[in-house]
Image: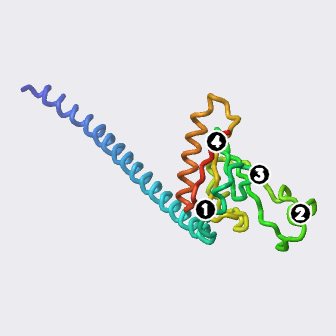
Amino acid sequence: MSFRTKFKGIIAIGLLLPIALMACRKEERAVEGVAQNAVKAEQQAQAKESQLDVDRAQLEQIALPTKSLYIDIHDPSRWSNPFLVVGPQNFTLRILLADANTSNVGQGTLLRPESARRQELQLRPADLDKAIVAIPAGAWHYGRVIAIAELPEAPKKDRAQVRRNLEAAIQDLNNLGLVVQEWPSR
């Protein structure tokens, strides 16, 4: 082997060594970035789980559902507990607040109409948990049970999305410890 060939080999090694070191350093940084992302994801999961525990504890203050109170109700307008209508982009949460007047005098008349206590809220799916926890205890007339139905006016092209939203909402409500009464589409 000539001196020239040996010299070219040494120069090639001298040039490749810094490139190899830089490549290793980039790979190290990439691995560190992945590890940091994993730690952040774990922390977010723990925070979400602890928030879910707090929400469950708050909802446990409401009595367990009494099925005999609602088994014979087949009309959504007569349902007194929270009622969730699921659409393709948002939800409608209907609640009936408790009557502030505890006497039976004038109940259901023009002086104390039920419609004055009925409220409908438009929600994003991501806000469902917060909205459910914020419902006052007096609005849970049958206990911890919520009715849910698909939006009947949803276009055919959105039916699959509505069903996915409904299934996700049922999962979220079950995670909160609620009994879900699914209503058929009208």
Is label 1 or label 2 in front?
1
In this rendering, is residue 36 above or below 137? above
Horizontal side of residue 36 vs 141, given as left or right: left
- CA separation, marks 1 and 2? 27 Å
In primary-sequence order, the first of circles 4 and 3 is 3
Residue type beneath disc 4? Glu
Q: Which mark is residue 53?
A: none
In this rendering, is residue 59 above or below 128? below
In this rendering, is residue 128 above or below 19? below
In primary-sequence order, the first of circles 2 and 4 is 2
Q: Residues within 10 Å of mark 3 (few under 14, many from 20)?
A: few
In primary-sequence order, the first of circles 3 and 2 is 2
Kindly check if marks 4 and 3 are in contact, taking CB atoms under 8 A apart as contact: no
Is label 3 or label 2 in front?
2
* Disc 1 target residue: 67
Q: Residue at x 24, y 37 (%)?
A: 14
In primary-sequence order, the first of circles 1 and 2 is 1
Q: Dividing the image into 4 quarters, which one contains the N terminus?
A: top left
Horizontal side of residue 164 vs 154, given as left or right: left
Residue type beneath disc 2? Arg
- CA separation, marks 2 and 4? 31 Å
* Disc 4 target residue: 150
Q: Residue at x 93, y 59 (%)?
A: 110
Task: Work out which residue is located at the far left of the displayed protein and give it.
Answer: 1
Kindly check if marks 2 and 4 are in contact, taking CB atoms under 8 A apart as contact: no
Is label 1 or label 3 in front?
1
Q: Position of residue 36 (x, y in %)?
A: 43, 54
Residue type beneath disc 3? Glu
SS category of the residue bearing label 3: strand
Q: Which mark is residue 120?
A: 3
